[in-house]
């Protein structure tokens, strides 16, 4: 009798611990992904940063147009007079701070909801790998401003940002890679259609971000 | 069925040990806290599983100092990676067998 009860106990206990091979494989894949990629990036933050970029580009366009009306367009867009440079720099900085700020806020919330810690090893890898091409691009753009080559700023921003995304996509969702490639292509096209930098910038940082954010939201978060 | 299970790796019987190996397969190295957080384990529990993997030489331990703080990281060894792949294959055959 005792033997039977231990047998039953053993069977029950073993059954409780048993996980099917499918479950085991899912668990393995999940652990691999969670430990090497940061996947809590919120889709909404993409939509918001796109909206900020569009508003920022709109403000820049409005400002340059109003100057062009009083001074002539060539003067406003071609020469880097101090006042419009300061306005555009503040405008761009504001877009950047708002976009990054909203991104951090929404991603923190999503990471908490998913039960992942925000700054785990995968997140750090993502940030470092994103930062290297991005900071290089930033310095490159500062040099362009310094030398007065403002026509190349928008293409350079798009290309470096695209390269940063392609490079960092190994440490987050693969879809980021496609966004990066799209930004690079847009940057290359705008290199050859000089004078429409603001328009390309608005498409690359505004429209593409909104489209990508919405796509990510519907694919992973809904 | 018995023949199938024959090839099953004893070291990977535990989900925790399989989990540790999964993390080390895709990361060059991982420290204790990272594993602890990912696998949601207590210190003692994780330490004993790590020791078991260390004993069969599936993982290697690297001890170093960051400033004055000791920092221990773990990596999957060649044998460990081989055993992990074999185990995955075994799981696959098991799934295929179920379908029939």
Image (cartoon, rainbow, N blue to C red):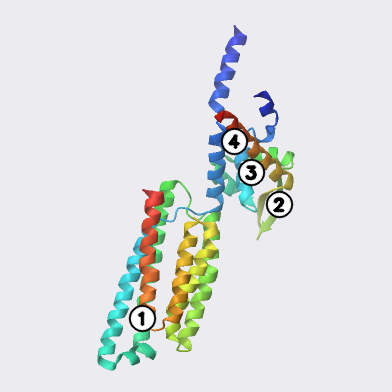
Element under disc 3: helix
Q: Secondary structure at mark 1?
A: helix
**Residue assigned mark 4:** B15
Residue B60, disc: none
Badge 3 crowding class, 10 Å Cα cut-off, few under 14, some 14 to 19, many 20 or more, is: many
Crowd class of label 2 (few under 14; some 14 to 19; many from 20; radius 10 Å):
few
Residue B67: x %, y % from top left: 65, 61
Q: Residue at x 53, y 44 (%)?
A: A30
* In the rendered image, the vertical position of residue A60 relative to residue A181, given as above or below: below
Q: Could you tell me how far apart the alpha carbons at marks 4 and 1 are, in whole angstroms? A: 56 Å
Disc 4 to disc 2, C-alpha distance: 23 Å
Q: Is residue B30 left or right of residue A54?
A: right
Q: Chain of mark 2?
A: B
Q: Which mark sits nearer the N-terminus, 4 or 2?
A: 4
Residue in front for this viewpoint, A185 or B38: A185
Task: List x then y, in percent, for residue B14.
Answer: 62, 34
Give the mark nearest the N terminus, 3 or 4: 4
Q: Is residue A158 left or right of residue B61?
A: left
For the view shown, which residue lies furthest in the top direction?
A: A1
Q: Where residue B21 is drawn, which disc sits there?
A: 3
| Residue hosting label 1 | A88
Left or right of B30 on screen, residue A54: left
| Tag 1 and tag 3 share a subunit | no
Q: Tell me which numbered mark, 3 or 2, is placed earlier along the sequence.
A: 3
Residue bearing mark 2: B62
Indicate the chain on which mark 4 is placed: B
- Tell me which residue sits at (47%, 71%) in the image: A185
């Amino acid at each position: 009798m005792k033997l039977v009860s231990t047998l039953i106990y053993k069977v029950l206990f073993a059954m409780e611990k048993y996980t099917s091979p499918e479950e085991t494989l899912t668990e393995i894949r999940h652990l691999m992904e969670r430990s090497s990629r940061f996947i809590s990036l919120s889709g909404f933050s993409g939509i918001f940063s796109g909206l900020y970029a569009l508003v920022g580009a709109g403000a820049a366009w409005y400002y340059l147009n109003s100057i062009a009306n009083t001074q002539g367009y060539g003067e406003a867009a071609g020469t880097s007079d101090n006042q419009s440079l300061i306005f555009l720099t503040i405008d761009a900085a504001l877009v950047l701070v708002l976009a990054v700020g909203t991104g951090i806020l929404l991603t923190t919330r999503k990471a908490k909801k998913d039960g992942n810690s925000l700054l785990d090893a995968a997140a750090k890898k993502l940030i470092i790998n994103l930062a290297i091409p991005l900071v290089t691009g930033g310095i490159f753009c500062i040099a362009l401003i310094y030398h007065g080559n403002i026509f190349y700023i928008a293409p350079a921003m798009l290309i470096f940002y695209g390269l940063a995304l392609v490079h960092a996509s190994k440490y987050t969702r693969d879809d980021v890679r496609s966004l990066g490639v799209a930004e690079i292509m847009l940057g290359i096209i705008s290199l050859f259609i000089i004078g429409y930098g603001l328009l390309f910038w608005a498409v690359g940082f505004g429209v593409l971000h909104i489209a990508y954010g919405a796509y990510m939201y519907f694919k992973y978060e809904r | 069925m018995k023949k199938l299970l024959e090839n099953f790796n004893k070291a990977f019987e535990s989900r925790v040990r399989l989990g540790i190996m999964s993390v080390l397969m895709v990361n060059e190295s991982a420290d204790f806290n990272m594993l602890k957080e990912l696998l949601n384990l207590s210190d003692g529990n994780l330490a004993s599983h790590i020791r078991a993997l260390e004993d069969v030489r599936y993982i290697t331990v690297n001890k170093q100092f960051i400033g004055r703080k000791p920092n221990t990281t773990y990596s999957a060894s060649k044998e460990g990676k081989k055993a992990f792949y074999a185990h995955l294959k075994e799981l696959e055959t098991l799934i295929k067998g179920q379908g029939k």
